[in-house]
Image (cartoon, rainbow, N blue to C red):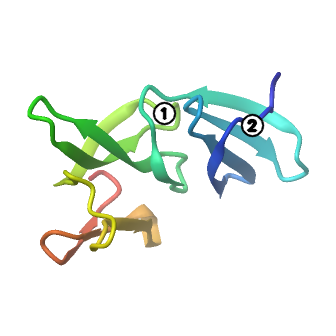
C-alpha cells in the first residue's frame, strides 16, 4: 500500500520531507517529518547513491550496459518528477573493479554538484544547470 518500502537503499531530506528510494521497484517515496506518507514517484532507471538538491532534482549514478558488453556508469540529473534531464559525467566500469577507486559525488552550496572521477583522478564541479 501507500508508504510501504521494498528494498530501501537511499534517503535524503528535501523541502521538509523525508525521501526514501527503493531500488527493488525503482520508486522514491516521500514522508513528512512525522512519518506520514505524502507521495511516490517512479523512475525508469535504477538509481544509485541518489541525492536531492534544494529544488527537488535528483542526482544519481545509473549503470548503462552498452552494446559492446561494457558497463558505463553515468552521473545523471533528474527533474523533481524523476524524469531524466541530462548526463553530467560517465566512466567505464567494466569489468567491475571492486578494489579500485570509485566515483563519488555530493551536492554543495547553491546546488552545485561535486564529482570525483576515478579514472582521471579529477574533481569536477558542475553548476545546477550542469
Mark 2 surroundings within 10 Å by alpha-carbon count, few (fewer than 14), some (14 through 19), many (20 or more): some
Q: Residue furthest top?
A: 1
Mark 1 surroundings within 10 Å by alpha-carbon count, few (fewer than 14), some (14 through 19), many (20 or more): some
In what quadrant of the picture does the N terminus appear? top right
Q: Residue 34's spot in the image, x, y percent?
A: 91, 51
Per the image, label 1 sits on a secondary structure element best described as loop
Per the image, label 2 sits on a secondary structure element best described as loop
- Residue nearer the viewer, 47 or 59: 47
Left or right of 106, for residue 41 = right
Left or right of 122, for residue 13 = right
Query: Would residue 98 be visible to someone looking at this image?
Result: yes
Q: Residue furthest left?
A: 68
Query: Would residue 113 be visible to someone looking at this image?
Result: no
Q: Identify which residue is drawn at 80% across, 32% down.
A: 3
Comparing labels 2 and 1, the label whose residue is closer to the camera: 2
- Residue nearer the viewer, 127 or 62: 62
Dividing the picture into quarters, in which one does residue 96 lie? bottom left
Q: Identify which residue is drawn at 42% across, 29% down.
A: 83
Against 113, residue 96 (above or below) is above
Q: Residue 7's spot in the image, x, y percent?
A: 66, 41
Against 55, residue 81 (above or below) is above
Dot placed on the residue nearer the N-terminal end, 2 or 1: 2
Q: Residue 79's spot in the image, x, y percent?
A: 44, 37
The dot on residue 5 is 2
The dot on residue 82 is 1
Q: How far apart are the two marked residues, 2 and 1, measured between alpha carbons?
A: 18 Å
Q: Residue 6's spot in the image, x, y percent?
A: 70, 35
Q: Identify which residue is drawn at 30% across, 61% down.
A: 127
- Residue nearer the viewer, 29 or 112: 29
- Residue nearer the viewer, 85 or 75: 75
The dot on residue 9 is none
Amino acid at each position: 500500500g501507500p508508504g510501504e518500502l521494498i528494498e530501501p537503499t537511499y534517503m535524503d531530506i528535501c523541502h521538509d520531507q523525508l525521501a526514501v528510494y527503493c531500488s527493488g521497484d525503482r520508486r522514491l517515496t516521500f514522508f513528512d517529518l512525522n512519518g506520514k506518507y505524502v507521495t511516490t514517484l517512479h523512475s525508469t532507471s535504477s538509481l544509485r547513491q541518489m541525492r536531492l538538491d534544494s529544488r527537488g532534482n535528483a542526482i544519481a549514478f545509473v549503470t548503462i550496459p552498452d552494446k559492446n558488453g561494457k558497463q558505463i556508469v553515468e552521473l545523471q540529473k533528474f527533474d523533481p518528477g524523476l524524469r531524466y534531464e541530462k548526463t553530467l559525467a560517465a566512466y567505464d566500469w567494466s569489468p567491475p573493479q571492486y578494489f579500485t577507486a570509485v566515483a563519488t559525488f555530493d551536492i554543495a552550496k547553491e546546488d552545485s554538484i561535486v564529482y570525483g572521477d576515478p579514472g582521471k583522478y579529477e574533481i569536477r564541479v558542475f553548476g545546477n544547470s550542469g
